[in-house]
Image: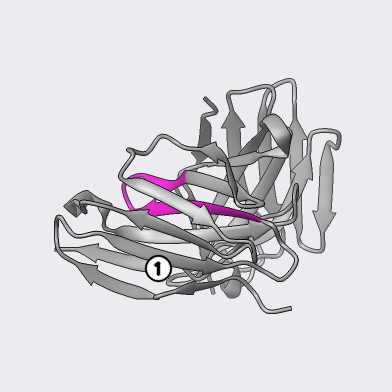
Amino acid sequence: KAGVTQTPRYLIKTRGQQVTLSCSPISGHRSVSWYQQTPGQGLQFLFEYFSETQRNKGNFPGRFSGRQFSNSRSEMNVSTLELGDSALYLCASSLEVGEQYFGPGTRLTVT
Amino acid sequence: GENVEQHPSTLSVQEGDSAVIKCTYSDSASNYFPWYKQELGKRPQLIIDIRSNVGEKKDQRIAVTLNKTAKHFSLHITETQPEDSAVYFCAASIPKSGSARQLTFGSGTQLTVLP
């Protein structure tokens, strides 16, 4: 099976802009979780989607949002970008309950 | 919420020696504990996991132990090789409503295996 894919792999944005990142899970996986990875804060949970519904959310401001489509592909959106949003954004897919497999990530740089 | 502490933050061992990384968690409801290996510039890769109804699990040179009473779990790598050099993350997962799962990660351990 193909692994988790994320697009784009690299992105440079300016403060105040918004950005949309995409994640395609492993075929058959219906759960997609998003994480932010930074050197200072490590890996932090953003949210999880299952069957097009957000069923869990981490402690991030409302500028971070996401959605999931009927084919389980997921997008996350960050509005009004801040310098501190620069990070590697990882998505992970899993069956309903089980091991999570990570995508390669999207490296977002905010200038 | 859950809090996971991981030690040490850096670990250097000689090739062939063993390496041990330790994690503690705060929420006794956590019931799933995966370990991930992340090489520089690559995605985290699941290397082993353990559930709360098991005390130990092995997979070739890698083993994980869980002490539910102490809320402590550890990764053991034997006969280390240079390709084991990477950052290792532990994580704990609390079951949420409707089978939702949220992983809380430790801060990572940079393992360096010296040839």
Identify the residue at image location x=69%, y=50%: B76
User: In which quadrant of the rendered image does the C terminus of chain A lie?
Assistant: bottom left
Identify the residue at image location x=74%, y=55%: A95
- Work out whether B63 lies above or below B40: above
The residue carrying pointer 1 sits among few (fewer than 14), some (14 to 19) or many (20 or more) residues within 10 Å by Cα, namely many
**Can residue B113 be seen in the rendering of this structure?**
no
Identify the residue at image location x=81%, y=64%: B60
- Work out whether A13 lies above or below B67: below
Query: Which residue lies under the disc numbered 1?
Result: A106
- The range drawn in magenta is A31-45
Identify the residue at image location x=37%, y=39%: A60
Expressed as whole percent of the image width and height from the top left, the position of residue B80 reads 65, 65
Label the magenta part by its dominant secondary structure: strand
Q: Nearer the viewer, residue A13 or B39?
A: A13
Expressed as whole percent of the image width and height from the top left, the position of residue B54 reads 85, 37
* Amino acid type of the residue tagged 1 in the rendering: Thr
- Work out whether A3 lies above or below B75: below
**Residue B41: in magenta span:** no
